[in-house]
Image: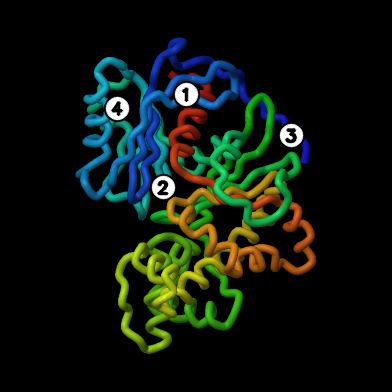
Amino acid sequence: MAAIANPVPEVQPRYAQGEVFLAADVGGTHVRVGLVRAGGSPGASPDVVEYETYACARFTGLGDILEGFLRGRPALPVRRGVVASAGLPLEDGSLISANLPWPLSPRDLRSRLGFEDLRVVNDFEAVAHAAPHMEASQVLQLSGPRQGTEGPRLVLGPGTGLGAAVWIPAQPRPIVLATEAGHASLAAGNALELALLGRMLGERSHVPAEHALSGPGLLNLYIALCGLRGVPARHREPGDITAAALAGDDEHAHDALQAFCGLLGSVVGDMALLYGAHGGVYLAGGILPRLGACLIESQFVARFLNKGPLRQALERIPVKLVEHGRLGVVGAARWYLDQPDHR
């Protein structure tokens, strides 16, 4: 697929040469914060000069985290920033999200931190802006050739929710399409999944993909599976289910994790077709890196490819597991640097 024209005006720098700005990646479980400088050339990866990770549960709000981060670095004055977060932005700049532990208001944060400028971007839109830099974060190749063709790249991952965005090559700079694909309806692909979906529908009128394909989603699958089999659910945390499944001492945890991997493969295949992701698929969710071997041994790849006559098209798409880590911070910074100056 050829790069498409993007009639967006040339970017005017919003920062002084060499100025450091703040970039944060806010998830439902962790907040990753960095101080960033622009790369040495247009489109280059931003230079992360300071970086910290914080557990959301230990703080009463994002302002506490960012203030503490900046307070520990007084020698680096910061006047601007960008926050990547899951959710839908409102007209006043605040964010609606089912997965954040506290409200997020850019106006309040800007005032509290004394910033001249603070922007908010969708979290997986930010991760997708790091797509050109993802090869360095590769953990495992799951399917397809080493390199895809020129075309859109899908970035997707389960964490506290299920995030997805599409990176599209364009001039003078790439376009990123933010999505709420995690809220699309989940579809079953076999008898067990149909039974699990039926049980979940008994509790709600709509079962979104992230109700099964996320950290909490793995717990939902496990509880539903135990309910189907008439056995008590021994585990109450996604990490405990994963540990028991990988240890091989709990068949229900094992089967729940296998169902998770199969459903993930099916959903990723659907999205790759929906968005024409010929450039590749990158799985960057926070809970996936420890599941690499499980993904390979599971039905993930078979379900990804199981799209009838379009199997051959999907076989040409590289599917890679990457370490999320700093990608959200790097991508948020790249997005910020690419924005026209609207001040």
Q: CA distance from mark 3 to mark 1?
A: 27 Å
Q: Is residue 164 left or right of residue 96?
A: right
User: In the picture provided, is 118 more to the left or to the right than 309?
Assistant: left
User: Could you say which is closer to the camera, residue 46 or residue 174?
Assistant: 46
Looking at numbered disc 2 in the image, what kind of residue is underneath it?
Gly
At which x and y percent is residue 223?
Answer: 37, 76
What label sits on residue 110 in the rendered view? 4
Q: Mark 4: which amino acid? A: Arg
Q: Quadrant of the N terminus?
A: top right
The residue positioned 51% from the left and 40% from the top of the image is 127
Residue ID for mark 2: 87
| Residue at image location 68% in from the left, 50% down from the top | 318
Q: Nearer the viewer, mark 4 or mark 1?
A: 1
Name the image quarter holding residue 48. Answer: top left
Residue position marked by numbered label 3 in the rendering: 3
User: In this orientation, does residue 162 appear?
Assistant: no
Q: Position of residue 260 (x, y in %)?
A: 50, 68
Label 4 – label 1 distance at C-alpha:
23 Å
Residue at the spot of label 1: 47
Q: Secondary structure at mark 4?
A: helix
Quadrant assignment for the C terminus: top left
Q: Are marks 4 and 1 in contact (CB under 8 Å)?
A: no
